[in-house]
Amino acid sequence: MQHPASTRASWRDLTLFALGPGLLTVAIAGLFFVHPWPVPYAVQAKSYDPLFFGPVLVLGGLGVWLSPRIGAASAPSFRDGQAWLWLLAVAVLTGLAFTGVSAILDLEFNLSRVAAQAIGQRSINVPFPASIAHYTFGAVIEECMGRLIPIPILAWLIGSLMLRGRRGTLVFWIVAALASLPEPLGQALPLASRAPALALITVGVQYPGTLILVWLFRRFGWPVLIVTRLVQELSWHVLWPLLAPV
């Protein structure tokens, strides 16, 4: 039986997710429907289909609702401004740090150019200013698919239902470690045939970064994932191409 405070926190988290990232994502999808912009990957256009992003947001909301039940912190109270400032500061600095690592790799190994050649495009980025909306949408969808759906739902199913709350922390980290693999592997796969060493470097750098994000999720709650990803996406895919165009 769940404690009433935990239940209230879950519903507050879900409300914040629905009225914040969820509503923003729906609005951007509507903008794309009215005035679509070019995307480097054809599959990205399909992500704006309500039949795709709708279930992703619903399941992401379920993950947000379950997060306090698997040991992750709930979002701070709406009245706790100091906690929100601390969360935002950590998320922004983490996102910028991740972008800084990517920028170093890009300058050293021409990461963006190699990735664009691997998919037969001139650039891996959506042109500015449509890139702002595109990567904001992507930040929410990617965090839902990469962490907010698999980690809370699987950790709850295994830890709470199957094991009845036993070894909850161990279950959380096993699920998180496995759920953190697809993103770095997906980033490295297009590079594998053209630059296998760069693919290995990509995995070696990105995988620890995904685990850092999981730790932040457990420590600060789900908003830190969305904000960190948003900062990372906008700085890497919007700002960096303007400073170092491919």
Image: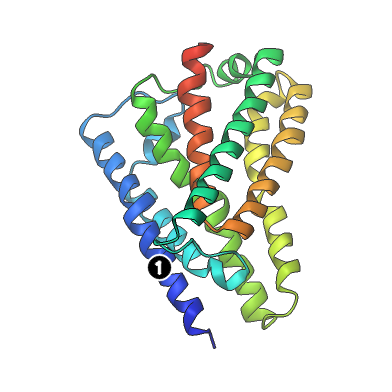
Residue 178 visible at all: yes
What residue is drawn where x is 46% and y is 78%?
7
Given the current orientation, which residue lies at the most extreme front position? 82
12 with respect to 103 (left or right) = left
Q: Nearer the viewer, residue 160 or 10?
A: 10
Q: Nearer the viewer, residue 240 or 160?
A: 240
As drawn, 68 above or below 238: below
Residue 16: image x %, image y %?
Answer: 38, 59
Q: Quadrant of the N terminus?
A: bottom right
Quadrant in which residue 199 is drawn = top right
Q: Secondary structure at mark 1?
A: helix
Residue 8: image x %, image y %?
Answer: 43, 76
As drawn, 94 above or below 244: below
What residue is drawn where x is 38% and y is 29%?
132
Residue 155: image x %, image y %?
Answer: 63, 68
Q: Nearer the viewer, residue 187 or 219?
A: 219
Residue pointed to by mark 1: 12
Residue 225: image x %, image y %?
Answer: 54, 49
What residue is drawn where x is 68% and y is 38%?
185
What residue is drawn where x is 35% and y is 52%?
20
Quadrant in which residue 194 is drawn = top right
36 with respect to 85 (left or right) = left
As drawn, 122 above or below 17: above
Residue type at mark 1 is: Arg
246 with respect to 162 (left or right) = left
Given the current orientation, which residue lies at the most extreme bottom position? 1
Image color mode: rainbow
Residue 122 visible at all: no
Q: Residues within 10 Å of mark 1 (few under 14, many from 20)?
A: some
